[in-house]
Image: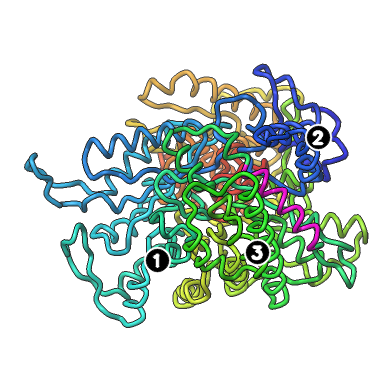
Amino acid sequence: MSEAPAAFSAPIAEQIWDMKYRLKEADGTPIDETVEATWDRIATALAAPEAEPAQWVPQFRAALQDFRFLPAGRIVAGAGTGRSVTLFNCFVMGTIEDSMGGIFAALREAALTLQQGGGIGYDFSTLRPRGAAVSGVAADASGPLSFMDVWDAMCRTIMSAGSRRGAMMATLRCDHPDVEDFIAAKADPARLRMFNLSVLVTDDFMEAVAADTDWDLVYDGTIYRTVNARDLWDAIMQATYDYAEPGVIFIDRINATNNLSYAETIAATNPCGEQPLPPYGACLLGSVNLAQLVRDPFAPGAEVDEEALEELTGLAVRMMDNVVDASRFPLPQQAEEARAKRRIGLGVTGLADALAMCGLRYGAPEAVAATGRWLQVIANAAYFTSARLAEEKGAFPLYDKDAILAAPMVQRLDPDVQAAIAESGLRNALLTSIAPTGTISLLAGNVSSGIEPIFAQEYTRKVLQPDGSRTEEVVQDYAVAEWRRRNGDAPLPDSFVSVADLAPGDHVAMQAAAQKWIDSSISKTINVPEDIGFEAFKDVYMRAWKTGCKGCTTYRPNAVTGSVLSAEPTPAPTPEAAKVVQLFAPLDRPTQLTGETYKIKWPMSEHALYITINDIELDGQRRPFEIFVNSKNMEHFAWTVALTRMISAVFRRGGDVSFVVEELKAVFDPRGGAWVQGKYVPSILAAIGGVIERHMVATGFLTGEGLGLKTDPVDPLGHAQEAKVSAPGPTCPNCGSFEVHMAEGCATCASCGFSKCG
């Protein structure tokens, strides 16, 4: 990797750029020599649709400078490359026809879209419930969840562009007869893992919940049964309390406030929920980096430069409008939909950093007010720019003046903006959205993501070196790094807060303040403590409903999805925890060794694995000496022989061999892991690593303190035992580390920067 250009404010930024966004030849030779070259590539590509591209290239380039405007990752990676990829992040697919032909035609469209790198959303409410009669074939319907399983299996086999697995959202109406099964689907840890699930909640349902009245479950005009509305609401709440899904989408509010309510009906969102979209709708995303627009950071008069914010917003809208013309689309219906409405989703990132730099505590009334004010500036500037673009290039094809001027968002805009729309129309039907920005925020120097709070002020990241070794580096939040640069080791001001410092109400207040000025929706995760009471948990959703949010997603650490880990790295075993023998030659094998045998029944294998670990005693310390892995399954023969020889060779060299555990447990099987006795294990190798770890603790070679181990006494006679494999939390599918946290509905890895919705 070349020397970091001046544009990068942190090493992690260059690493993310080189790994995900730098244009390279097929053999890995860089084409973008610096990040400035990447900006040049993007600016040139997005200026191409202009009548006079040369006029706009330098202005677009200036907007990208210093990561002030951050187009979504698809644009950064794909614009100007000539590759056959879409620049749109996600799509809501066409309505699924309730017939076998219609279902599998929709499945094919989904596969094509995932293949080109787009996440997808689907409403499965159009499919008849389980047990309903299927005319003409003397059979009963299997219901929407059975077909969701088919989608889930398809998604597992398709790698999205950029080596990302596809992300999917599934929605079901709160009055569908199978809604209770849908609510409970994620209770099965192995089911629908490629989907995010959300219930489409109507106004009538929320009123029925408040009144504690009955609620009919209906399909195609037929009432299948009647339930108590409050009981159904409690079932939704209990499921998301227990295993973080389903989310809740207030669908009537979305349709009532949609600028295009006269032309479309929405029943689904993209995978992370920030874009409610009609059939074949697409989300085009970009973010203004508020952290780069703060004047006099940390000074008493620190503030966001609102004039600069207006100017940057105008350029960003123009660039994103051009993406509609520059992008490819997986399906012709998606291209037609995008060009008929020219919908874009301009949002923000670095909000929490900007607040901290302005002396405002995230979630406090002053921060809520500032958030609303900044997003009001963006909304007015975006709509004014779109009106000017309509005057220059024409309004979007489905523009209806009276309907647009009556839309709730337009009614809130400044009078001069409304006048500009009345005079010229709008180039873009909808303009604002706040999306997950995990990876591009790392690219911008680890600014806080979207409108989320600062996750951690700093954390330790492992970096793979060219020689295969790993080094550790401390990654600081952007605002923290700015404070340190200006003030050294002086204590951070009170305006710095992280996720752990916030009450759920702080999150809801920030989301509601932003939603007022966002015409689409917002991707945000409300992190709640594990010990929150159920009634308090339900109140989070009711507060979101009452304060005008369009949806609500929470994350509570739980047994199914694992805990969100602390930013503090797990301490390595100390010399006291493992007595180390430093040797340069292999130990000789005694004729007789004492050992234990463990059994692993891997769910995807017909035959169990038997793992024998033999120990040697040196200086009164029992330590592992060799390992054997046996199974009747010949599929495993070659790699088990290789594994046992390699691990045994490491053991026989002496020293601190506990790293073997860490390396094995970090192995991620791209086909997916398995749930073993209620715990997720990312691969067979990780399961073996867990057995070795347990054995080392049981024999006293390692202590379990600080390692999160749950151990059982080892049978001293060495009889075969069932290995209770445990994983300390969700693993990263890219690097295998456990440094994964939830933000904006997405799993984000603090170790390698991987981010995934779905």
Q: Quadrant of residue 480?
A: bottom right
User: Dot 3: few (<14), some (14–19), or many (≥20) neighbours within 10 Å?
Assistant: many
User: Dot 1: few (<14), some (14–19), or many (≥20) neighbours within 10 Å?
Assistant: some
Q: Is residue 182 magenta?
A: no
Q: Is residue 716 visible?
A: no
Q: Amino acid at mark 1?
A: Asp
Residue pointed to by mark 2: 36
Residue 286 to residue 290: above or below? above
Callout in the foreground (1, 2): 1
Question: For the magenta stretch, what is the residue range?
Answer: 306-321
Horizontal placement of 102 versus 198: left or right? left
Residue 318 to residue 509: above or below? above
User: Dot 2: few (<14), some (14–19), or many (≥20) neighbours within 10 Å?
Assistant: some
Callout in the foreground (3, 1): 3
Going from N to C along the chain, the mark reached first, 3 or 1, is 1
Q: Nearer the viewer, residue 185 or 13?
A: 13
Callout in the foreground (2, 3): 3
Element carrying mark 1? helix
Residue pointed to by mark 1: 252
Going from N to C along the chain, the mark reached first, 2 or 3, is 2
Q: What residue appears at the point 78 percent right and 39 percent down from the top-left corner?
A: 61
Give the quadrant of the N terminus: top right
Residue pointed to by mark 3: 417
